[in-house]
Amino acid sequence: MHPVSEVFPALRWVLVAPKGASTALTLFTWFDSMPAGSLRGIALSSDSINANYEELSARGVVFESPPMAQPWGRIEAIFHDPDGNTIVLQQQP
C-alpha cells in the first residue's frame, strides 16, 4: 500500500473534522473542473463496497467502473448524481 503522497507527490490537501467526529471534509484544488467554492465531489465510506455497488447498480445507478483497488490502498467505485456531482464510495482494504 502506497500513501497518496507517494503516488501523486504534487497533490496537497487538508482534511478537516470536529474532534471525535466520524465525518470529515477534504479540501483540495487539483481538479480544474472543481474550482474552490464548488461542491462537485463527495466521498462516502463503505464497510461493504461490493454490496453497495450491487444494490445501487440494481437500482439503476451507473458507475464509471466496478469497485477497484487504488495504489494508495483504498477500494473505490465512482458514480455521478443527476446534478453532476461525483460520488466516490471508498472502503479500506
Image (cartoon, grey):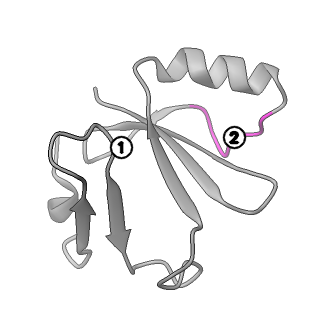
The Cα atoms of the two marked residues, 1 and 2, are separated by 16 Å
Query: x, y percentage for residue 71?
Result: 29, 47
| Dominant secondary-structure state across the stretch colored magenta | loop
65 in the magenta segment? yes
Secondary structure under the numbered disc 2 in the rendered image:
loop
Q: Is residue 83 left or right of residue 55?
A: right
Please determine whether, in this image, residue 35 is positioned above or below residue 2: below
Query: x, y percentage for residue 72?
Result: 25, 47
Q: Is residue 70 left or right of residue 36?
A: left
Task: Give the labeled residue for mark 2.
Answer: 63
In this picture, which residue range is highlighted in magenta? 61-66
Query: x, y percentage for residue 59?
Result: 82, 24
Please determine whether, in this image, residue 68 is positioned above or below residue 71: above
Secondary structure under the numbered disc 1 in the rendered image:
loop
32 in the magenta segment? no
For the C terminus, the quadrant is top left
- Count all numbered tags in the image, as a single digit: 2
Q: Sort mark 1 into few (<14), some (14-19) or many (20+) by Cα contacts within 10 Å.
A: some
Which residue is found at the position 52% from the left and 32% from the top? Answer: 67
Q: Answer with the quarter of the image where residue 33 lies.
A: bottom right
Q: Amino acid at mark 1?
A: Gln
Q: Is residue 17 left or right of residue 75?
A: left
Q: Sort mark 2 into few (<14), some (14-19) or many (20+) by Cα contacts within 10 Å.
A: some
Query: x, y percentage for residue 39?
Result: 57, 69
Which residue is found at the position 59% from the left and 49% from the top? Answer: 87
Residue in front for this viewpoint, 10 or 40: 40
Which residue is found at the position 36% from the left and 43% from the top? Answer: 70
Please determine whether, in this image, residue 23 is positioned above or below residue 11: above
Q: Amino acid at mark 2?
A: Phe
Task: Give the labeled residue for mark 1.
Answer: 70
Please determine whether, in this image, residue 90 is positioned above or below residue 27: above
| Mark closest to the chain's N terminus, 1 or 2 | 2
